[in-house]
Amino acid sequence: MDDWSQQLLKLNFQKEKKEDGSSSYTLILGHRRDSYWTKITVKQVGSPIPDAWQVTCARSEIRVGLWKIHNTTQDISVVVHTSAQKMIEDINYQTSLKPSFLTRISNWSHYKLAWSTNIAKSNVRPTLNPDEIDNAISQADLSDIESEIIEYIRYIGVFNELSLKKALSMPSKPPALYRLCRACEKIGHQLPDQFKAMMTWSEKQSDDNIAWQGNLVCAIAYTCDGTKLQPENSTSLYHTFAVHKELFNGLGSDWKAHPLRDSAV
């Protein structure tokens, strides 16, 4: 095969010319969960006419260190071919290899840990004291419907505009989330320092860099792969929220005896 260089280019290898006149070719494969090898390099041995080709296949995976996240080489294979035909055939075979199920799961776990670590480092949510929140709620002069909203979402845990409105039989206007914001503003007046810290966090985690008062008690929910549950991401018909963990009290109550049970079922 005289046209081995063109064959490599057709396989999406990137060519790099060396100072000694030789050439090397690099192929970055797809996601490490879809292809066993993550990088294949072909180096020409001999110049200007090659005597052989060194094919190096490497697999790197994400690892989480104490201070940073980095890629490490987990497997490597080096083969020297004296036939261009055999070299191309070997590359076609190597690119077809898939990782085992356990390898995919292991690497995905490292990826999720890396993603979680980045999120945690970038914007840590302030933690609220449930007793302080309870005292603030009792002193916030909430309306009956505002009290019901706070009580219900702390009980149910996950909610959206439609489920909240339906559970509490609220009219279409004003929106239920607007009522939630008003309630959180009143509660925040009783906890100025905590409210200010939470609004700073809210602004940083917002897609539009705008603080949302409702973030005092809840935040947008995420899918398992880290995507927000909201129409903008095509993951949900409505913006879906989860009450902050320290404020959720549904498991400590008797649902059958709860005063909101009849309207929420």
Image (cartoon, helix red, strand yellow):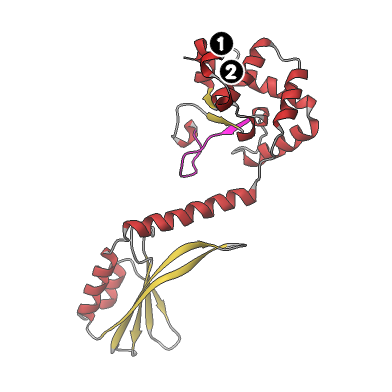
Report the amino acid beneath label 1.
Met
Give the quadrant of residue 73.
Answer: bottom left
Residue 158: percent from the left, percent from the top? 53, 28
Residue 100: percent from the left, percent from the top? 31, 60
Please say if 100 is above or below 25: above
Nearer-the-camera pick, 44 or 202: 202
Is residue 223 on the magenta stretch?
Answer: yes
Report the amino acid beneath label 2.
Ala
Residue at label 1?
A: 170
Q: Which residues are magenta?
A: 218-229
Q: Residues within 10 Å of mark 2 (few under 14, many from 20)?
A: many
Q: Residues within 10 Å of mark 1 (few under 14, many from 20)?
A: some
Please say if 95 is above or below 142: below
Assign the N terminus to one quadrant of the image: bottom left
Where disc 1 sits, the SS reads: loop
Residue 80: percent from the left, percent from the top? 29, 84
Residue at label 2?
A: 176
Residue 204: percent from the left, percent from the top? 66, 42
User: Is label 2 in contact with label 1 (beta carbons under 8 Å)?
Assistant: yes
Please name the residue shown 51% across and 38% down the image: 222
| Cα gap from disc 2 to disc 1, whole angstroms | 7 Å
Residue 103 located left or right of residue 162: left
